[in-house]
Amino acid sequence: MISRTRKDSEQEHDLAPPADEYISPAPRVSVQAFCATVATATTVRSASEDRRLGKVHLSVHMGGIAAAIDTYHKAPTPNVIMLETEGSSDMLDGLDELATVCDAGTRVVVIGSASDVTPYRELVRRGVSDYVVGPVETLDVVRAICSLFSSSEAVAVGRIVAVVGAKGGVGSSTVAHNVAWAIARDLALDSVVIDLDLAFGTAGLDYNQDPIQGIANALFQQDRPDSALMERLLAKCSDRLSLLAAPATLEQVYDFGADAFDAIFDTLRMTTPCIVLDVPHQWSAWTKRALVGADDILIVAEPDLANMRNAKNMLSVLKAARPNDRPPLYCLNQVGMHKRPEITPREFAKAIESQPIATIPFDSKMFGTAANNGQMIQQISAGHRTTTMFLQMAQRLTGHAVTKRSRSALLAPIMPIINKLRAGGGGRS
């Protein structure tokens, strides 16, 4: 059993990570679990429905390690074997026997109990990839399987952030583009914005880009897109930010199946730390799949009744579809529009039963100037409170802090004034 191992230590298990810890999706692999208890079998079956194991073929069997040995005397082993043990007395002997029928390259995860006294080092010597102390929860199983591949293959697996409007015209694209700009510039993460509104997308205009190629070239080709193709299709917006633009033409009707964009997302994940999806306001098989499959979701809403209803419905559906993920987040946009009756942020939050991560004020002049110039709000007014809001949303969605370099960059617009005062003001006694 040739496999990845943890550091060679006697530690039985690590402290539980935060609930919102990022877990990379597992690739297309086969996993067979041999459980000793019904409770664990039920938990593993529940884990098989998690979005991060969507490509995994996971089967559950009873009988523990003895059943696994009997099975693999007659059949080839899968990519991953998950074993539940009821005691440590015969665990090592069982693992030794399993090794005689296990194919090279198969990874083994052991689910033990708190009473086990087998040293972790002995498990490592027998090729065990991971050891999880039971009783296990659904997320423990998901993490155990996904971590085998995210840590072992030395390949970056990018985080996907999906931004969608609760209603058309609420400014979700503007929010998505400015948050992506903050992720790339201030958090120093190489990022890609994907404009999924193929007919009417505005990302090219907002970033002042007019690429000849874009997402349509990857979507409509016969072969599966590879990293080299995706690299050619990306338009460079800044040192760390690239754009996969929409054609924004009406020459054809853009009807897609549920999995139409899967290959594009999977390919970009392998090379890009952060991917921001600008999802159009529509409810179809592929938009739902894109939202459910994202690592984090941001819903943009205006403070009116239709937005409140739609946001509540979307939050409810997406929470149910992603029971093991952090709940979707939402922000309020264009708040305080002159003479428009509005639902207050407090009333909106009470109806939604959660607080918005940002309340962006209505500023037609600043946002209109940025849109017409093909600029981000940070480029128009670096010190504006809305710029700070976009940065805070970027941090909340990615879990990353501002880099030291970018903190100094935030002072760049006022540095000439500071330097002038230093030069002309003299020293104080």
Image (cartoon, grey):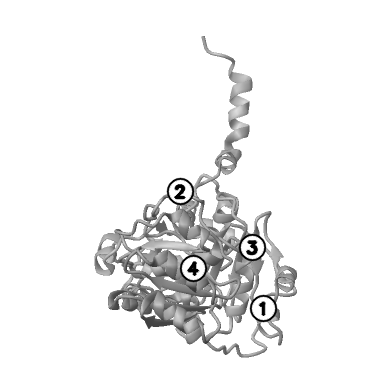
Q: Residues within 10 Å of mark 4 (few under 14, many from 20)?
A: few
Q: CA distance from mark 4 to mark 3?
A: 59 Å
Pointer 4 with pointer 3, Cβ within 8 A = no
Pointer 2 with pointer 1, Cβ within 8 A = no
Q: CA distance from mark 2 to mark 1?
A: 33 Å
Marks 2, 1: nearer the viewer? 1
SS category of the residue bearing label 2? helix
User: Viewer-proximal residue, 143 or 248?
Assistant: 143
- Label ID, residue 96: 4
Q: Amino acid at mark 2?
A: Arg
Q: Quadrant of residue 360?
A: bottom left
Q: Residues within 10 Å of mark 1 (few under 14, many from 20)?
A: many
Is the residue 262 above or below the residue 132 in the image? below
Q: Is residue 325 visible?
A: no
- Label ID, residue 247: 1
Marks 4, 2: nearer the viewer? 4
In the picture of the structure, the residue carrying the numbered disc 3 is 207
Q: Position of residue 137 (x, y in %)?
A: 33, 68
Q: Amino acid at mark 4?
A: Asp
Q: Position of residue 403 (x, y in %)?
A: 55, 44
Q: Amino acid at mark 3?
A: Tyr
Give whichever of discs 4 and 3 has the lower sequence position.
4
Residue at the spot x=44%, y=79% of the render? 68
Give whichever of discs 1 and 3 has the lower sequence position.
3
- Label ID, residue 385: 2
Residue at the spot x=55%, y=66% of the render? 149
Q: Position of residue 198 (x, y in %)?
A: 61, 80
